[in-house]
Amino acid sequence: MGKVVILNHPLIDHKMAKIRNKDTDTKTFRENVNELSALMAYEITRDLTTHTVDVETPLAKTQCKMLSNQVVLVPILRAGLGMVDGIQSLIPTAKVGHLGLYRDETTLLPHIYYAKFPKEIKNATVLLLDPMLATGGTVVESIKVLKEKGVKDIRFVGIVGCPEGIAQIEKHFSDIDIYLAALDEKLNDIGYIVPGLGDCGDRLFGTK
């Protein structure tokens, strides 16, 4: 059974206040999303496996631990891109896939327009990145794509979520761990998270 983890930490709370503020400029917003993602990655990867290696320090030989897991980051285009650099700053060996989806204006169903993944993705720990977990439809479709590729260890990483989005993931995939920096109240009637932080993609890339 997957778990839902809300990462409570004073540094996370401080950066959340900055990105929620409607007056925060694009540069500051992007920097704080990156920093939030790095802070979250520290907790999300706590259970990754390691192996022992021999290391020679300036004084003596010793044994140390190094990561055994291959980590692959899969940002959902385009807002998910804003989380990649922060996580890669902690896991520079992480490879990056990309997944692009659009929503049909008539059916409101998500459709894939781009998918490119590293060869190792099947056996990797995959962090699926999207800052906003709103209706959950796009995330569910993305998880389907990853499972069709044979991925077994999928962890969704978002910044702000709501109960409706969590319920949608759990309805379709009860084995997925969900990590959020904040769990907000609800969706409004046009599908935005309240209080939320607005359109994360637009705020990251200065397109509104």
Image (spheres, rainbow, N blue to C red):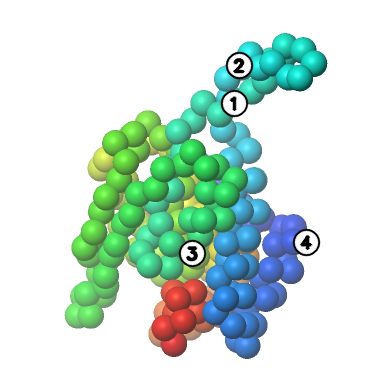
Q: Is residue 64 left or right of 151 when viewed as pictured?
A: right
* Closer to us: 176 or 25: 25
Q: CA distance from mark 3 to mark 1?
A: 27 Å
Confirm or deny contact between disc 1 and disc 2 (CB under 8 A): yes
Name the residue located 43 percent from the left edge and 48 percent from the top edge. 73
Nearer-N-terminus badge (3/1) = 1
Name the kind of residue labelled 4 in the image.
Pro
* Residue type indicated by callout 1: Met
Which residue position is annotated with label 1? 66
Q: Earlier in the sequence, mark 4 or mark 1?
A: 4
Name the residue tied to disc 2.
53
Residue 82 is marked as: 3
Indicate which label's residue lies in the foreground, 2 or 4.
Answer: 2
Q: Please report whichever mark, 3 or 2, sits nearer to the chain's N-terminal start.
A: 2
**Looking at the image, which is closer to me, 184 or 49?**
49
Residue at label 4? 10
- Identity, as a three-letter code, of the amino acid under mark 2: Val
Sequence-wise, the earlier of marks 4 and 3 is 4
Dividing the picture into quarters, in which one does residue 113 lie? bottom left
Instruction: Find the distance from the CA under tag 4 to the CA under tag 3.
Output: 21 Å
The part of the image, by quadrant, that contains residue 105 is bottom left
Helix, strand or loop at mark 1: strand
* Amino acid type at image mark 3: Gly
Q: Earlier in the sequence, mark 1 or mark 2?
A: 2
